[in-house]
Image: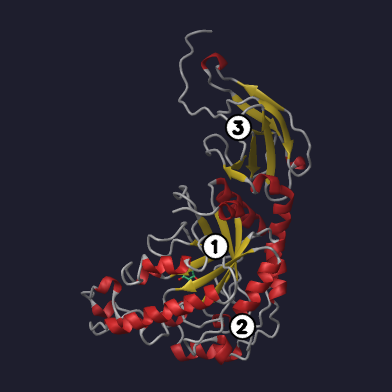
Amino acid sequence: MSVPKWFEDAKLGIFIHFGIYAVGDVSESWSFYHNRISYEDYMNQIKYFTCDKSDAKRWAELIKKSGARYSVLTTKHHDGVALFDTKYSDNSTIKNSPYKNDIVKEYVEAIRDEGVRVGLYYSLIDWSHKDYASVYEGYRVPDDLSMVNKYTSPTDGKQDKEAWYRFMEFNKNQMGEILGNYGKIDLLWFDGDWERSEEQWGLPELKDYLKSFNSDIVINSRLKSYGDYKTPEQGIPITRPEGAWEFCTTINDSWGYRPSDNHYKSLGQIIRMFCDCIHMGGNMLLDIGPKPDGSIDKRQEDILIGLGEWIEVHKEAIFGTDEGIMHRYFLGGSTVSKDRKTLYLFVYDKPEENICLKGLSSKIKKITLLHSGKELTYDIHGGVPWFNIPGITWIKLNEKDCYKYVTVVKIELEDELDMYGGSGTVVTHN
Ligand code: GLC
């Protein structure tokens, strides 16, 4: 698993869950899968998917403003409704919704024009395709057939491999469309790999096929073991995931637009989650769900703009940096410059008199606040320098000098960052 440098340095991406589910205040695909709405009523939403305020340029400008370096649009969710012009299925917005333009094309062009990397989400699962529910995961017939969901697999224990091969051919053709018809695609975001085995998804050959369109394409890890980076979802990791990773999250509780979901995270919470991700060497993929007319809820727009403002002020501590130091050194987030001579501390809560940095062995050159340039004084207490055990660095900082939401303290060092990690010692020589 490895990713190109652009992805590691990108830090922020914007996810867009756009689909017919935005019409009726239901969850994307899962609502019919779990029988919360009938399949017919779910699909009927497409008639009201007007996109009459749709403006990909506006989306792209907003995404650019958020500070994101890449963006990922759902080209087809588990419901199988393609937002692109597909030769291989009638299940598409172009064929069945009032909006006759190719949404994926409009998106790709607008995003590319803004200089943002282009990502496409594609659900491997297609609960609408007649050949999809033809086999079981790994061809293993479950003991209890009453637990089988009819959209996923046959309910009678009889498998049809031919149908499955047809489905795979269909999926591959559609992937060929999204990767081949819109110029270079930087990232492919799969979903739903859990319903079949590697062999059934045709791996590793499928990966070679995808790479034939762009050998540098980044593929998320929802392609069984063939992805390039991990995608923890909704629950922020506590332990750093191994290798490259991206945390995907909603702004409220829903991926797609749901007018009844008012459980929005605040801007401060989103900024802090973002800092948590980059502190542990990951990216954050923040989701928006446009309305069925293509416009974006003001609350989602405000979060993106606010996040972008914060990022703009603090970009030096974000882009071109590596993951930070452990929380046992500093109770907050942090990043380290590529030359390892600058440490950026993310101060989450307003301090009363100072913040505390433990274990710093390197000599400090200067400490400033990133947003204002104001120099901060500090004091070092304790330590046993002749045993190479550093003292505690107390950096003077109080509420009035802090920035909104998260304050960044920039510590310039004489040499490369060096942290002490031991358990102390008895001082035998004074
Ligand atoms: C999920 C869901 C889906 C959502 C996605 C986002 O596991 O299946 O509805 O689009 O992943 O990460």
Image-based side of 312 in relation to 215, left or right:
right
Q: Is residue 220 above or below residue 395?
A: below
Secondary structure beneath disc 2?
Answer: loop
Mark linked to residue 357: 3
Q: Nearer the viewer, residue 421 or 105?
A: 105
Marks 2/3: CA–CA distance: 53 Å
**Lower position in the chain sequence, tag 3 or tag 1:** 1
Q: Which residue is mark 2?
A: 102
**Lower position in the chain sequence, tag 2 or tag 3:** 2
Marks 3/1: CA–CA distance: 30 Å
Report x, y in % for residue 205.
37, 67
Quadrant for the N terminus in the image: bottom left
Q: Is residue 54 above or below residue 117?
A: below
Mark linked to residue 405: none
Secondary structure beneath disc 3?
Answer: strand
Report x, y in % for residue 226.
40, 61
Q: Residue at x 64, y 87 (%)?
A: 50
